[in-house]
Image (cartoon, helix red, strand yellow):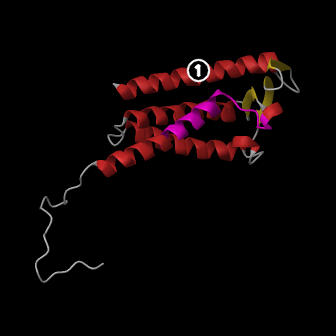
């Protein structure tokens, strides 16, 4: 049930991402576009066509990036739906990554570029990004937290011998090396 709900939310995030991008094109749109001040000196809404990957890397590689993204996303979807993923944090983090990945993939295949509009560049010099990017970053951050938390939990759980036997005690003639 949790996986179905996470996939439903994933679909809602993809739809919301696409709706905001349609608005960004219409309100801020090409070519140079409008820049709307939300918080002066900090946050703006700006229209940017990203024809590369994250942070503007690999400019002009839209189709190959789209194909690589599709393969990775299909693998993540398969993995999410497999019986291996049971931890709620992993379910939700993978769903966020899928939402963001598919949101940007739709842009790459149907527009030939990714629409970015969230602009904090005045303060941080950070590239303009979008909701899909936020989903991918949050999902990835959640996976990192999950790895740390789940690893610590697993370290606290006592591990038994895989054959189900008790640990062997050392005899009098067996000495532990220092």
- Is 25 in front, or is 158? 158
Residue 87 in percent (x, y) is at: 36, 37
Q: In the structure shown, which secondary structural element does the residue marked by tag 1 occupy?
A: helix
Q: Quadrant of residue 162?
A: bottom left
Residue at 41% of width from left, 23% of height from top?
5
Q: Is residue 178 magenta?
A: no
Residue at 30% of width from left, 78% of height from top?
178
Quickly name the residue at label 1.
15
Residue 74 in percent (x, y) is at: 49, 40
Q: Is 137 on the left or on the right of 165, as rendered?
A: right
Q: Main secondary structure of the magenta part?
A: helix
Residue 83 in percent (x, y) is at: 32, 40
How many numbered badges does the structure rendering display? 1
Give the vertical position of 171 relative to 102 (above or below).
below
What range of the chain is rendered magenta? 124-143
Residue at 80% of width from left, 25% of height from top?
46
Residue 127 in percent (x, y) is at: 76, 37
For the N terminus, which image quadrant?
Answer: top left
- Is 127 in front, or is 165? 165
């Amino acid at each position: 049930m949790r996986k179905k709900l996470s996939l439903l939310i994933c679909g809602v995030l993809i739809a919301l991402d696409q709706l905001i991008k349609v608005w960004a094109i219409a309100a801020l749109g090409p070519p140079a576009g409008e820049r709307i001040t939300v918080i002066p000196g900090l946050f703006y809404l700006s229209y940017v066509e990203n024809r590369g990957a994250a942070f503007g890397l690999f400019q002009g590689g839209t189709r190959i990036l789209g194909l690589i993204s599709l393969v990775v996303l299909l693998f993540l979807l398969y993995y999410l739906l497999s019986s291996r993923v049971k931890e709620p944090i992993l379910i939700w983090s993978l769903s966020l990554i899928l939402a963001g990945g598919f949101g940007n993939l739709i842009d790459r295949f149907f527009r030939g570029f990714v629409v970015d509009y969230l602009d904090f560049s005045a303060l941080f010099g950070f590239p303009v990004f979008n909701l899909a990017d936020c989903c991918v970053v949050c999902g990835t951050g959640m996976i990192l937290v999950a790895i740390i938390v789940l690893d610590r939990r697993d370290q606290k759980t006592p591990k038994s011998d895989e054959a189900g036997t008790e640990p062997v005690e050392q005899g009098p003639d067996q000495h532990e090396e220092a």
